[in-house]
Structure formats: structure tokens, C-alpha cells
Image: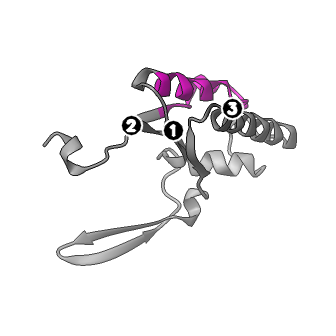
Amino acid sequence: MKYMILSYGSQQDYDAMAGKDTGRPGWSGEAVAAMHQFMEAFNKELEESGELVETRGLAAPVHTRRVGSRGGEAFVTDGPYAETQEVLAGYWIVECESFDRATELAARLGQCPYPGDPADTMYADIRPIVDSSADLGF
């Protein structure tokens, strides 16, 4: 079964990693390097186990466009959005034996180096990937 592991952040997180003052603990060059090393090692382990299908990080929310419709008319809103609004920061698609295994993998992301206390802000969602509309259950 395939699962998508989704990680989240905010524009404030991206700004802190870029060295901008955000009023929260900042990211030094060493902290950013430690995060990259952790992610590279995590991805390599998943690749070597045969569980990694794909992984990508996403650009900062400031580079986001949201498209919607009001009254039948399309509209476009450019980012960034409110500092507290979390957005998808990256994802992993894994193929593994069970939902429990996918959850175990996602839980390891909490070990990623992070200034301050990551337990206050970091989380991931795990969602099964369906193969067809019949798998949706409606």
C-alpha cells in the first residue's frame, strides 16, 4: 500500500531558516545544515529499504498562488498568507506494509533538528493513497 506523509510549515518557518528575524529562535547555518543532513539520511534509509517512492520539498508560501471561484468567477490570491497559517512544506510517498509502518516513519520526522522545541509546532499527516475511485468508499 502507498501512503503520503505530509509535513507542514509556515512562511515564518521559511523566513527563520533564511536567517530573517521572526521573533522565534533563529536558524544558524549549522542548524540548517543539520536539518538537511537529517533529511538526506532519512530519505536514503527509505530508498535503501525500498519504501521510498518519491519525496519533495516545496518552495516558501510567499511563492504560492491560490485559485478559487466566487460567484462563478475565478480569482487568484498570491501568498504569503498569515504567519500562523500552516501550509504543506513537503511530502514523501512511501510504499510499505501497513498504516502502522507509515506512521512509524512519519514519527521519525520529529527527530529532525529544529531550533527551540519542535514538539510545539511540528507534525505530519499520513494518508493512504487510493488506486481508484472505488477505493474512496462512497
Callout 2 secondary element: strand
C-alpha distance separating marks 1 and 2: 10 Å
**Contact, CB < 8 Å: mark 3 with mark 1?**
no
Amino acid, disc 2 = Arg
Residue toward you, 35 or 134: 134
Is residue 119 located in the magenta-colored stretch of the structure?
Answer: yes
- Of the residues under marks 1 and 2, which one precedes in the sequence? 1
Q: Which mark is residue 127?
A: 2
Say whether marks 1 and 2 touch (CB < 8 Å): no
Residue 59 falls left or right of residue 31? left
- 110 left or right, relative to 95: right
**In the figure, residue 115 lies in which quadrant?**
top right
Q: Which residue is mark 3?
A: 45
The residue shown at (37%, 42%) is 129
The amino acid type, in three-letter code, at marker 3 is Glu
Q: Which residue ends up furthest to the bottom in the rendered image?
A: 73
* On screen, residue 27 above or below 77: above
- The residue lying at 52 percent from left, 21 percent from top is 104
The image shows residue 54 at horizontal and vertical percentages of 56, 48
Name the residue tied to disc 1: 94
Residue 87 visible in rendering: yes
Q: Residue at x 86, y 38 (%)?
A: 30
First to last magenta residue range: 101-124
Asked whether the viewer can see residue 21, the reply is: no
